[in-house]
Image (cartoon, rainbow, N blue to C red):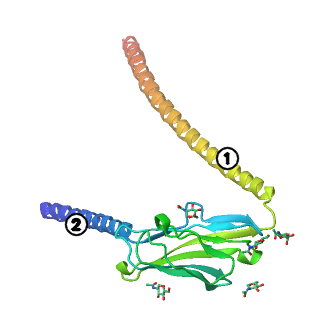
């Protein structure tokens, strides 16, 4: 019976591992698949702070491993929750400069699909231009799956140094806190290490001293033993 139980538990564990392996394989294929799909990107820093009246670029590029064909793209502006189209177009293939329909004033399509660039330019920005812009793309090769990336434009009347000092203060405070935490962890680990070492030392000391005690006891014991003998006499 015991051996049956052991085999059962081994099989149980194998099945568990098999599940894990299957999960890993499916995850691997899922990531490989998603890497093939279209990707819209607004760059590493998805926001910009700019002064009113200036001209800004809203960056966006697309990437696709399976290639594009009649890629539909648009830029949308989130105006109090309602999405307003800024511009839209269909790109027949990579490298072709598309005809772009523009719905807003002071907007230019500057990406020109050059190296998959679909960036736009906003001229003489006003405070009303500030907000969330979505770069949207859909590749018919992918069964009309939607892809998008969001860029935030913050319009200010002057670039304030205060904001920068505040972020620096926050950053340094966070950095300091992290350093402190790490220092604390290191100190804790070091203290624990020292403590365990000390404990080991202490144990050794206890063992050796008790060993000495034993011999002493033994000696005194033998002395004690030898003492009563005269008493018995
Ligand atoms: C920006 O806005 C401020 C405050 O409304 C105004 O005084 C300034 O003239 C504006 N600058 C431009 C370039 O429009
Ligand atoms: C958006 O909301 C703000 C404040 O809630 C309001 O002043 C503005 O007129 C709204 N804009 C539009 C286009 O509805
Ligand atoms: C896209 O085009 C704009 C305008 O020409 C340019 O400023 C930007 O750097 C380009 N972006 C990339 C990723 O090439
Ligand atoms: C932008 O503003 C400048 C002056 O500030 C003006 O000459 C120019 O025509 C404006 N451009 C647009 C597209 O409104
Ligand atoms: C993709 O976006 C369009 C709007 O452009 C929408 O009608 C459609 O339902 C979306 N499809 C999916 C799968 O989200």
Q: Which mark is residue 184?
A: none
Residue 225 position within the rendered picture, expressed as x and y whole percent measured from the top left: 37, 16
**Circle 2 Cα neighbour tier, 10 Å, few/some/many (<14 / 14–19 / ≥20):** few
Dot 1 falls on a residue whose secondary structure is helix
**Circle 1 Cα neighbour tier, 10 Å, few/some/many (<14 / 14–19 / ≥20):** few
Residue 42 position within the rendered picture, expressed as x and y whole percent measured from the top left: 55, 66
The answer to whether 146 is drawn above or below residue 185 in the figure is below
Compare marks 1 and 2 and give the one earlier in the sequence. 2
Can you say which quadrant of the picture contains the C terminus?
A: top left
Looking at the image, residue 41 sits to the left or right of residue 155; the answer is left
Disc 1 to disc 2, C-alpha distance: 47 Å
**Residue at point 67% right, 66% down?**
56
Dot 2 falls on a residue whose secondary structure is helix
Q: Is mark 2 within 8 Å of ligand 5?
A: no
Dot 1 and dot 2 residues touching (CB under 8 Å)? no
Residue 173 position within the rendered picture, expressed as x and y whole percent measured from the top left: 70, 50
Can you say which quadrant of the picture contains the N terminus?
A: bottom left
**Residue at point 36% right, 68% down?**
36
**Residue at point 78% right, 60% down?**
159
Q: Which mark is residue 176?
A: 1
Looking at the image, residue 186 sits to the left or right of residue 155; the answer is left
Question: What residue is disc 2 on?
Answer: 15
Q: Quadrant of residue 93?
A: bottom left
Q: Quadrant of residue 26?
A: bottom left
Tell me the quadrant of ligand 3: bottom right
Nearer to the camera, 143 or 73: 73
Q: Nearer the viewer, mark 1 or mark 2?
A: 1
Residue 48 position within the rendered picture, expressed as x and y whole percent measured from the top left: 67, 64
Nearer to the camera, 73 or 19: 73
Q: Quadrant of residue 96?
A: bottom left
């Amino acid at each position: 019976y015991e051996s049956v139980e052991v085999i059962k538990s081994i099989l149980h564990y194998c099945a568990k591992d098999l599940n894990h392996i299957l999960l890993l394989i499916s995850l691997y294929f899922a990531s490989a698949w998603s890497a093939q799909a279209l990707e819209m990107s607004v760059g590493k820093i998805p926001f910009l702070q700019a002064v009113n009246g200036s001209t800004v670029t809203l960056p966006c590029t697309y990437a696709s491993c399976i290639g594009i064909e009649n890629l539909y793209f648009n830029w949308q502006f989130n105006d109090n929750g309602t999405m307003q189209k800024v511009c839209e177009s269909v790109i027949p293939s990579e490298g072709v400069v598309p005809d772009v329909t523009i719905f807003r004033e002071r907007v230019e399509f500057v990406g020109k699909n050059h190296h998959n660039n679909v960036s736009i330019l906003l001229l003489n920005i006003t405070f009303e231009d500030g907000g969330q812009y979505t770069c949207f793309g859909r590749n018919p090769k992918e069964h009309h799956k939607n892809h998008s990336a969001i860029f935030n434009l913050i319009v200010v009347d002057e670039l304030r140094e205060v904001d920068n000092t505040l972020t620096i203060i926050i950053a340094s405070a966070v950095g300091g806190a992290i350093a402190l935490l790490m220092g604390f962890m290191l100190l804790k680990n070091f203290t624990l290490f020292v403590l365990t070492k000390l404990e080991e030392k202490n144990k050794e000391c206890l063992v050796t001293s008790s060993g000495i005690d034993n011999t002493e006891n033994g000696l005194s014991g033998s002395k004690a033993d030898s003492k009563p003998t005269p008493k018995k006499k």
